[in-house]
Amino acid sequence: MPEHGTASISGAYIEFQSAVLKALPRGITDELALKWAGEGERLTRMFSVLAQLPMAETNKTKKPTLTLPQYPPDSEVFELTIDGDAPENDPIEMVRCDGYGSPEKWKFTGQKVAGIQTRAFKLVRVGVCRNLKKVRQRLAQYGDIPEGQWRQAFKAAYPQPDGNGPIGIADSSWVGPGGLAGFPCVRSGGGSDFDWAGLARDESWRWLVPASK
């Protein structure tokens, strides 16, 4: 029987065959490639038509990269929204979620956020302070200290820490079982916590204060 296919396959067809194999999904094997070679005459006729068609895009679609929002720069105004009535934003539930033992023995003596609110804030630094009372004195120029529940809103809006120091809300309305007052904060590594009001603070601390838009 005369050989019509394999001996007459042109170099152009071989290049086409190679390109098609590369464009096909996974699962195309060398065995299939050999079968193609045995169909040389018929496929050569197809080549004149198929070679004029655009080749399939072989690059896989890249998955979108999730970019978390960065902490706002110092003194830049930004907005936070909170539902003060949500269970996770309850002052004592905040203590429980932070991992403290016997949260039911804590007391909350401050003002709660009521309902859903959106407010403007900014982060400021006040330098080294020997205790929270001194911090509050330096923050007085910015207005009333926000309710500590706003820590929850900040964490939700900015879940990725920047590692450049803690974020504090100078609301010392949380009183532990031993009678020490504490305020909510976000540690430099991103963890939620309550820090005692009597401790000194260095210049790395940033404080959440109200701002005008």
Image (cartoon, rainbow, N blue to C red):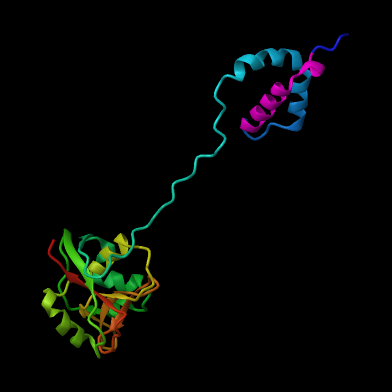
Looking at the rendered image, the quarter that the C terminus falls into is bottom left
Q: Residue 85, percent across and down?
A: 20, 61
- The extreme front residue here reads 11
Q: Nearer the viewer, residue 2 or 32?
A: 2
Residue shown at the point (75%, 13%) measured from the top left: 41
Residue shown at the point (17%, 78%) measured from the top left: 109
Q: Residue 31, percent across and down?
A: 77, 29
Q: Nearer the viewer, residue 154 or 211?
A: 211
Q: Is residue 94 above or below residue 68?
A: below
Within the image, what quadrant is residue 203 found in? Answer: bottom left
Residue shown at the point (55%, 38%) measured from the top left: 59
Within the image, what quadrant is residue 131 found in? Answer: bottom left
Give the residues drawn in magenta, as a range: 5-23
Could you tell whether 191 is left or right of 148 in the image? right
96 drawn magenta: no
Q: Is residue 96 above or below residue 159?
A: below
Q: Does the image show residue 170?
A: yes
Q: Is residue 136 above or below residue 82?
A: below
Q: Residue 201, percent across and down?
A: 29, 85
Residue shown at the point (34%, 79%) measured from the top left: 102
Within the image, what quadrant is residue 165 found in? Answer: bottom left
Magenta stretch mostly in which secondary structure? helix
